[in-house]
Image: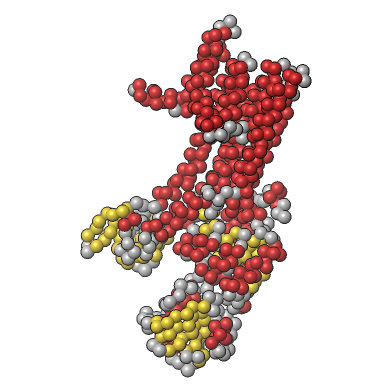
Amino acid sequence: MMKRILSFFKSDVGRIILSGILFVMGLSFPESYKYVKLALYLLSLAFCGLPVFIGAVRGILRRDLLDEKFLMSVASIGAFFVGEWSEGVAVMLFFLIGETFEHSAVRRSRNSIRALMSIRPDEATLFNDGAEETVYADDVEVGSVIVISPGERVPLDCQVISGASEIDTSAMTGESIPRSVTVGDTIDSGVVVLSGRLIARTLRVAEDSAASRILELVENANENKSKEETFITKFSHYYTPIVVGLAVAIAVLLPLLRLATLKSAIYRAMMFLVISCPCALVISVPMAFFGGIGGAASRGILFKGGNVFSSVARADTFAFDKTGTLTTGKITVSDVECVGISRDELLLLASSAEQGSNHPIAVAIASLTDEHLPIEALDEIAGEGIIARISGRSVAVGNEKLMKRIGVEFTVKDGTAALVAVDGRACGTVTLTDSVRAEAASAIAELKRLGARRVTMLSGDRPGAAVSVGEKVGIREVYHSLTPEEKYSKLNEIKRESGKAVYVGDGINDSPALAISDVGIAMGGIGQDSAKEAADIVIMADDLSMIPLSVRIARRTVGIAKFNIAFALLVKLLIMLLGAFNIADMWLAVFADVGVAVLAILNSMRTLLRPTSSVRIPKFISNRR
């Protein structure tokens, strides 16, 4: 029991309560009990201020003289020196209350990110020769067979080889509706199996699995500081020494000029030190971005750093890839035409050649036949297609650019089609269709409502297919038949014309454009290392409505940070002026420090909440250039 009591009074809350009781007792004694009051105040100051005094001494030893603990220690001791005992204790007591509140708020913000840690299970159940064995997930090799029972999280990225189940992907993508998986479907680590028991083959080791990559992105995000955070660091470097210099000037010059007594001058100087403490700025501004990163991550939107928020908030130009981004990427074959070759032979050769590529069109063509011929040589040309050597024959599958490259003439009707040439001779076409995402049109419309002045499509597809998708989703400015290099050049041109540009893509072919954009957004790209590395934001769900949500989160986060800066500086400046003219007292100075810090922190915690669709760009952000 005694240990619990001692432990409680060692905590911040316990020290605040004990110090507060002693402080109130000191106030309640009449002035005739002068030394009793002094003893109670000193005890109160010891309980609430001892860690602060120790921290100030350590700061001096580190040659960091102007941190908040040093400023508060000097102010408290100075107040005692001029006989204002109660105010000397009040400075330290309320500083401790403010720090306790700050620590609690920071813990809450961190918990929003630490909650993500639960998406990565530490153990996996291996299935070998009918026996099950629980092992560390880090020890499981690629190709191992694992068992996931209902209620368990998937420990590694895997492909289902037996069983069927509903899975909860909310922790990974932010989607609340479960989806069904069965044999042949792939599952990311971190999702929860809800109903049936699954047996699956692992596709990646634990450190390369989706859940691990999410955690890596979120953990690294805090290292990339926003412009507002960088501003606060630089500002504090100059601001605090200037104010301390002014405090010294007040203490020295006012008595010399006979504008105040020495006691009054020192009292005013102490107020300056309390007011100058940059706690509200140093804590609340980084906390706004910390909360923004955590709040976005809980919805399946991964910002790679606080520096991304400002760029997204100011962006008014958006460029989209087509296939797999504005469309589902689930391409189906609608027609096959043959010239001088049988349908079966054409499909066998085309599907065999395309099995060596991960492009959505290649995957669709590769699935046309159950059996494939071995590939003897393979050359994949980005933005054009594939040339493969199969059974001694040269098989080319791609677009008109590829056919021109190998000197084959094709007469092609408008539409999305893969052209097939064998041994330098046109042999047929495979016509493909790709459906537009259901939410694409509403997402584009929402971006325009949020102030997007220019929305474009950069597609490698044919003119007819690209324009058709553009019309369906509400994009009039469509660029088609672009190679990855041409996308890069076109986006660079758009940036020069429009300013801040966001590019949204989904795969390896989009990596150059993602890299050159002011903000690159990878759609469902956590499995694509190239997209993950090039993008600034990763959208876990294949849901375009997350794009306008990202803009709203970014604008609100930046708006909150800038409001905190303006609010804290204005209040501090006002009370500094009042203190210089002997209008304000130490209690008001304490409010300028602790009160403003608490209010700014409460404001920063709003970044953890879901923004409403009514969020619009603030005026002070809209001045883009």
In the depicted structure, whether residue 560 falls above or below residue 515:
above
Q: How many marks?
A: 0
Work out which residue is located at the far top of the displayed protein and give it: 32
Split into 4 quadrants, where in the image is the C terminus? bottom right
Q: Please provide percent x and percent y for residue 363.
A: 45, 75
In the depicted structure, whether residue 602 falls above or below residue 164:
above
Residue 323 or 513: which is nearer the viewer? 513
Where residue 149 sits, quadrant-wise, is bottom left
Q: Is residue 336 left or right of residue 230?
A: left
Residue lying at 55% horizontally and 58% vertically, measured from the top left: 536
Residue 223 or 427: which is nearer the viewer? 223
Where residue 279 sits, quadrant-wise, is top right
Residue lying at 45% horizontally and 75% vertically, measured from the top left: 357
Q: Please provide percent x and percent y for residue 105.
A: 52, 37
Q: Please provide percent x and percent y for residue 537.
A: 54, 57
Q: Please provide percent x and percent y for residue 225.
A: 57, 48
Residue lying at 43% horizontally and 24% vertically, measured from the top left: 9
Residue lying at 49% horizontally and 78% vertically, measured from the top left: 380
